[in-house]
Image (spheres, rainbow, N blue to C red):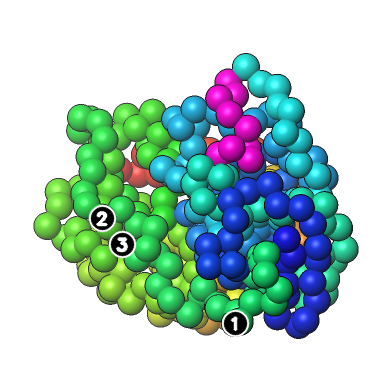
Amino acid sequence: MKLHLKDGTSYEGQSFGAPPAGGSVAGEVVFNTGMVGYVESLTDPSYAGQIVVLTYPLIGNYGVPKKERFESQKIQVAGLVVSEYSENYSHHEAKESLAAWLKREGISAIQGVDTRALTKKLREHGVMLGALSNNGKPRKFTDPNDENLVAKVSTKRKHVYGTEKKRIVLVDCGAKENIVRSLVARGATVIRVPWDYDFSREKYDGLLISNGPGDPTQCGVTITNIQHAMKKNKPILGICLGNQLLALAAGAKTYKLKYGHRSHNQPCIESDSKRCYITSQNHGFAVDEGSLPKDWDIWFTNANDGSNEGIRHKTENWRSVQFHPEATPGPTDTAWIFDNFMQSLK
């Protein structure tokens, strides 16, 4: 099997997943520098349409646990690239090998690739279109950001979790399951709705806009619904893609990062305290801080590249973060953001 990049470069290795449907599988090639958490990352809907390169050299050594540990109901990545795959796994919660899981879900994967060289290439050039193929070069490369990926991964109907008095509408743009777990554990009833759902008919105390894949400007209906919600003056919290959607609803702009942030150790500085938090991240777009209206402040800033990591309104209780306070995988240093959001609910 080979990984082909749009610039003509190819990397040869051995397949350990499912054969590519139709001979090849295309996507946007990105890299993740996390040392653990491949199960959570592979099931993160924010990876939809992407071929993920894991930079940690040994993958698969602790197997795959039961489905309750997943961040969605299935593997979301288009393909997987690793340096070395371990078929022999050891963990008390493991139910099957990574290869068996990939094959069962029809996801192609390749090992034996120099992921260090590949990652250096992506850092210098930026994320690139690519394809995994068994039969020579693919016919074409497709950019997943040209379509509405959110519509593909969002829930198709409303779900309600819990029976508590405080009610939170979760706009599912590709929400990770630990967002729901984190809210329910703090005493909330979570009303999970599709990305384009008109939640104005719902009785709720707060609104949470989830993470998700792709270009935020594809979610015009969601942006309009957020603007309508702003007229109710109820607390709003955005996470990851939710940060970008809240900014767009406020009148700001977004842009695509060169190679994105996909890791568990991104340092983010909080504006007031100047404290640096280590965060888990997975996104390819960011908020253009220069386009923020005057009634909005910068809440967090990435200490590595200076990009935006959070915004907040000066007078209303509307705020969002670009990173993942729910973690899984990654550090839980910013879980307090959920606590603050719950405290803001009347």
Q: Where is residue 139 in the image (x, y as percent from the top left)?
A: 61, 82
Q: In which quarter of the image is the C terminus?
A: top left
Q: How crowded is mark 2: few (under 14 residues within 10 Å), some or many (20 or more)?
A: some
Q: Residue at x 76, y 36 (%)?
A: 86
Relative to 121, is 155 on the left or the right? Answer: left
Q: Earlier in the sequence, mark 2 or mark 1?
A: 1
| Count of number-bearing discs | 3
Q: Nearer the viewer, residue 35 or 232?
A: 35
Q: Which amino acid does label 1 sit on?
A: Lys
State whether residue 273 is above or below residue 253: above
x%, y% of residue 42?
A: 57, 48
Does residue 71 appear left or right of residue 164 in this picture?
right
Task: Compute the Cα span from label 1 to label 3.
Answer: 30 Å
The amino acid on which the numbered mark 3 sits, given as a three-letter code, is Trp
Label for residue 304?
none
Decide whether residue 95 is among the magenta residues: yes
Q: Does the magenta stretch include residue 39?
A: no
The image shows residue 288, relative to residue 33, as above or below, that is below
Numbered mark located on residue 195 in the image: 3
- Disc 2 target residue: 156
Residue at screen point 63% across, 32% down: 97
Residues marked 2 and 1 touching at CB (< 8 Å): no
Q: Can residue 133 be seen in the rendering of this structure?
A: yes
For the residues marked 3 and 2, what is the alpha-carbon distance in whole angstroms?
9 Å
Q: Residue 140 shows which numbered tag? A: 1
